[in-house]
Image (cartoon, rainbow, N blue to C red):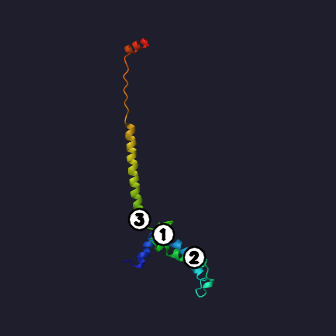
Amino acid sequence: MKNAWDIIRDILDNKSTFALIMISWVMGLPLIWRLHFYLDFQQPEKIHLNHLVFFFLGIGLVLLPFLKTVKISNWIEISREVKETKAEMKDFKSEIRQTVSMLSNTVNTSLKQQVNLTVNLPNSEKAMKGETEL
């Protein structure tokens, strides 16, 4: 089990995760801070839908770095499994390279094949006879 300092060290070592945390917290925490002044649950008639939407948006931004996947219906699906995605992309690239290499070899082989056409022409004496007969 990792302690908190190991987790913080891993986050700081991975620059993309650190950037995601900083961007989402810089946007989410001020939203929550500003909106907590307007959200008074003892007077629910003063709470507007806009306040609730932005409050939950702020909470979502603060929690975003800790989510593995974010899926919004069938529109958007974002996954943070970068290492697995990179491995899949390498496999896909190697398959594409093999396919292109095979196609290239096939095309080169078919172009290298020579078409031999043999035309038997009569010798000059027979050609002269045929010309005089015409």
Residue 48: mark in rendering: none
As helix, strand or loop, the secondary structure at mark 2 comes to helix
* x and y, in percent, of residue 117 in the image: 37, 28
Residue 53: mark in rendering: 2
Q: Residue type at mark 1: give it.
A: Lys
Marker count (numbered): 3
Circle 2/circle 1 CB separation < 8 Å? no
- Against 91, residue 111 (above or below) is above
Q: Earlier in the sequence, mark 1 or mark 3?
A: 1
Distance from label 2 to label 1 (Cα)? 18 Å
Residue closest to the far front: 134
Is 128 in front, or is 108? 128
Judge left or right: residue 111 versus residue 50.
left
- Against 9, residue 91 (above or below) is above
As helix, strand or loop, the secondary structure at mark 3 comes to helix
Distance from label 1 to label 3 (Cα)? 19 Å
Residue 71: mark in rendering: 1
The residue identified by callout 3 is: 83
Q: Residue at x 38, y 32 (%)?
A: 115
